Amino acid sequence: SMNTVLTQEIIRYNRLLNMIHNSLQELLKAMKGLVVLSQALEEMSKSLFNNAVPVMWSKVAYPSLKPLASWVLDLIQRVEFVQAWVDHGIPNVFWISGFFFPQAFLTGTLQNFARKYVISIDTVSFGFQVMKLTSKDVIQTPTDGCYIRGLFVEGARWDPATHVLGESRAKELFTEMPVIWLQPEQNRQTPTSGIYMCPVYKTLTRAGTLSTTGHSTNFVFTIEVPSSKSQKYWIKRGVALICALNY
């Protein structure tokens, strides 16, 4: 099922890249006076001039709040992530922020586990382990589940010394989380204390709409993050994990 996830990602990225290439070629032709400058192309040229992502691109892209220059760099990194997966097989650590559709990847991970142990997927859910590793330290994939990277904490910070959520430092809006191990388990009971049920969003707006697949376009899932404080404490501070920042 990971091959299915990868194939879907490739299709989505190719659609976006084709749109970018074709529209830029059309715009160049219009600039040279070879074709009529349509309203869509005019809007696009204004966006490019203002360092904004053209609407015709963002329509077929993933949610993003980045200005054009950062958006392009991010797109290059995303394509490199997918290309490396194609070239070298399943990565040791998945860059969760690099997915067009992370929900499919999460479901695929649970399906793999269910198939491996011949159990019903309905009985399987994720346990979470925040690792004491950066992605460079990870040299192999875990026996079950997967490692993910690329999440940022907003409203708090991860304290590696105590291995729990801690207060944000002054002037520090976001801190990067270490690698997190998503461990599928059968009939798992959610711990009642010592964790914060932390929502994961694709972008900082935290708002989304329900897409045709029935998934939110922005909310991804909830991760249990080790915490010595109550759930309420972090909810009041609006603590969340974010896949991509707005710069």
Image (cartoon, grey):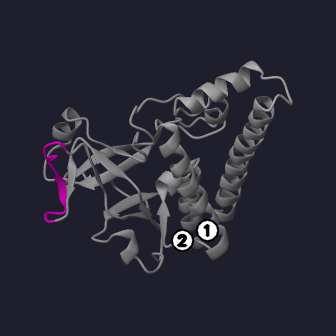
- The residue singled out by tag 2 in the image is 91
Is 71 rendered above or below residue 108?
above
Magenta residues span 161-171
| Callout 1 amino acid | Trp
In the picture, residue 235 is in which quadrant? top left
Residue 165 among those drawn in magenta: yes
Image quadrant in which the C terminus is located:
top left
Is 206 rendered above or below residue 142?
above
Residue 141 is tagged as none
Mark 1 or 2, nearer chain start: 1
Residue 152 position in % (x across, y down)? 33, 50
Whether residue 170 is visible to the viewer of this picture, yes or no, is: yes
Image quadrant in which the N terminus is located:
bottom right
At 34% from the left and 69% from the top, the residue drawn is 134
Residue contact at pointers 1 and 2, CB within 8 angstroms:
yes
At 74% from the left and 33% from the top, the residue drawn is 27
Q: Which SS class for mark 2? A: loop
Q: CA gap, disc 1 to disc 2?
A: 6 Å
Residue 166 position in % (x across, y down)? 15, 51
Residue 146 among those drawn in magenta: no
- The residue singled out by tag 1 in the image is 85
| Callout 2 amino acid | Pro
Count residues near mark 2 (Cα–Cα under 10 Å), then give few for <14, some for 14-19, many for 20+: some
